[in-house]
């Protein structure tokens, strides 16, 4: 498997997480129970950094071998 192929998997996973976050934000607007609101906010807080990392890794694996591509320092060894 190539890095370009791996990036597709990251993009697909990011799309699923993004969709879930949209659902949660809609649910948050209509939620009235404080406990339910807390759980929704907690899930949003947990998924948001996951989405960020998936997008960053997709970008990195898409362009890893391109000359001159600036790599995010977070993922450099």
Image (tube, rainbow, N blue to C red):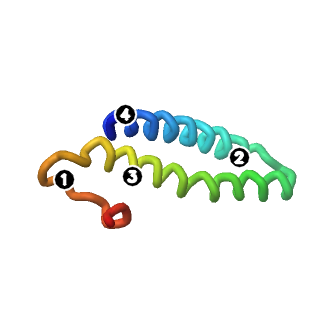
Circle 3 crowding by C-alpha within 10 Å: few under 14, some 14–19, many from 20:
some
N-terminal-most mark, 3 or 1? 3
N-terminal-most mark, 1 or 2? 2
Secondary structure of residue under mark 3: helix
Q: State the CA–CA distance, disc 3 to disc 4.
A: 19 Å
Marks 3 and 1: CB-CB under 8 Å?
no
Name the mark nearer the viewer: 3 or 4. 4
Circle 4 crowding by C-alpha within 10 Å: few under 14, some 14–19, many from 20:
few
Q: What residue do we see at 46% from left, 48% from top?
A: 54
Which residue, given by chain and number where applicable, does mark 2 sit on? 29
Which residue, given by chain and number where applicable, does mark 3 sit on? 56
Q: State the CA–CA distance, disc 4 to disc 2.
A: 42 Å
Identify which residue, 51 or 21, lies in the foreground: 51
Q: Position of residue 7 (x, y in %)?
A: 38, 39
Check the image and name the residue furthest to the left: 67
Q: State the CA–CA distance, disc 3 to disc 1.
A: 13 Å
Q: What residue do we see at 85% from left, 57% from top?
A: 35
N-terminal-most mark, 3 or 4? 4
Secondary structure of residue under mark 4: loop
Name the mark nearer the viewer: 1 or 2. 1
Name the mark nearer the viewer: 2 or 3. 3
Left or right, 22 with respect to 56, comes to: right
Secondary structure of residue under mark 1: loop
Q: What residue do we see at 73% from left, 51% from top?
A: 40
Identify which residue, 73 or 49, lies in the foreground: 73
Which residue, given by chain and number where applicable, does mark 4 sit on? 1
Marks 1 and 2: CB-CB under 8 Å?
no
Name the mark nearer the viewer: 4 or 2. 4
Q: State the CA–CA distance, disc 4 to disc 1.
A: 21 Å
N-terminal-most mark, 4 or 1? 4
> Picture quarter containing residue 71?
bottom left
Which residue, given by chain and number where applicable, does mark 1 sit on? 69
């Amino acid at each position: 498997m190539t890095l370009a192929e791996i990036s597709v998997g990251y993009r697909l996973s990011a799309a699923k997480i993004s969709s879930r976050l949209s659902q949660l934000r809609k649910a948050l607007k209509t939620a009235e129970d404080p406990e339910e609101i807390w759980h929704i906010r907690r899930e949003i807080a947990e998924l948001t950094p996951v989405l960020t990392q998936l997008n960053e890794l997709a970008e990195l694996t898409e362009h890893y071998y391109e000359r001159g591509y600036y790599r995010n320092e977070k993922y450099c060894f």
